[in-house]
Image (spheres, grey):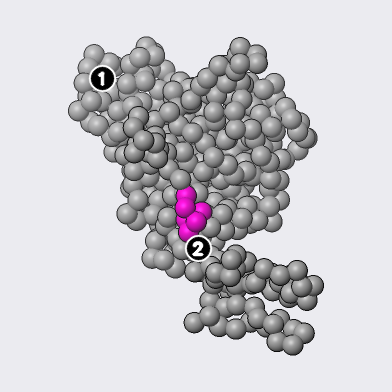
Amino acid sequence: MTTNERWLLPDGIDELLPERAVALETLRRQLLDRCMASGYQFVIPPLVEFTDSLLVGLGADLDLMTCKFVDRLSGRTLGVRADMTPQAARIDAHSLGQPGVTRLCYAGSTLHSASESITSGRSPIQLGAELYGSASSDADLEVIDLMLTLLDCASLASHHKPITLDIGHVGIYDAVMADSNLDPTTERDVFDALQRKSRPDLEGILRGVDTELAGRLQRLMDLHGGAETLVTAREVLSDLPEAIDALDQIDAVVGHVTAHHPGVALYVDLTELRGFQYHTGLVFAAYVAGVGDAIAKGGRYDNVGSVFGRERPATGFTCDLKALAEQCASQSEAGRVISVPVSGDAALAEAIAALRGEGCVLIKALDGVHDPGCSEQLVQQGDQWVCQSLV
């Protein structure tokens, strides 16, 4: 690497300069405060863990997304977290071990070995909330309410960024595939084709497969659209009780969001099986116009805690703070920025403390030079220090 290239960052890795950093930090504090006001306890999981606990039982896709290295102290493999949800599940199951319902929230940097999409980076700052200990639909509705409330706090609507909530359910795919007897490779290919909604690929994979199963999977690919999609789905899946139960859960979410978040558009997609493949039930994602990736996403993942010795029902969501901050203006208003002289005067120190208590920014004029960001200066008049305009 030449001297002129030493400032380059790895592909997909970025840094936040002052304006973006302040906007993101302001948003982070605001959203975490809202989570904690709803009873979610703030936790800070570690940046790295042994892969034995970070990845166990969570699927090959999360394994591929995780950057790994050998710990010089133990000789074991460490992983830099790619997703904080499994860490929160470990904290609930092992570190806390509380009875009843536990609510946790968190925010922190993550690292991906590769970008998930063309527009996303490799170092999202993830904020999330998780609810453990309740398998009820009310728990799912609570976390969806909280997610949509956080997006409302970010003032997306006021910046002409309408939100669409995409809803699906892993149980529908599971019900269709329950008696398929497909080999694991073929089933993975089917899953991938459904995710990409590639009908030619799906038809190619299903050649030689039972015609009834093939026909149902092809119809499943078409089950996406407005709430009316649920009516068609009930006809297509009428002989699968587990699928009908999943449709009832989606129906409940549609009714709840329509009643309580009337400004949110709804989209039902029964082949949307997002995430790191650890979800077990309802899945959902929020999109804003003009952004290809979900601005927030989540769902139910009841099996994750079992690998830590305590199986618990769980549901939650995460959002990428960088992506969210890009879509909304900072909620903080620029305060007064005041230049102060370098002096040991006690009255000056009192004036500085009082102004900082009012939210003003005070910057020392080193070598008598005012910082260019200052619009006022403190000057002494008699035994008092007062502000004067620098303009």
Amino acid type for the residue under numbered disc 1: Leu
Would residue 220 be seen by someone viewing this image from the given angle? Answer: no
Q: Is residue 19 rendered magenta in the image? A: yes
Magenta span: helix, strand or loop, mainly?
A: helix
Q: Which residue was labeled with disc 1?
A: 206
Q: Observer-nearest residue: 142 or 255?
A: 142
Amino acid type for the residue under numbered disc 2: Ser
Q: Which residue was labeled with disc 2?
A: 330
- Extent of the magenta region: 16-21
Q: Is residue 266 rendered magenta in the image? A: no
Q: Is residue 25 left or right of residue 191?
A: right
Local crowd size for mark 1, using a 10 Å CA cut-off: few (<14), some (14–19), many (≥20):
many
Local crowd size for mark 2, using a 10 Å CA cut-off: few (<14), some (14–19), many (≥20):
many
Would residue 205 be seen by someone viewing this image from the given angle? Answer: yes
Callout 2 secondary element: loop
Q: Observer-nearest residue: 122 or 258?
A: 122
- Where is residue 92 drawn, in percent x and y? 70, 33
Residue at figure coordinates x 42%, y 17% from the top left? 179
Q: Is residue 4 above or below residue 33?
A: above
Number of marks in picture:
2
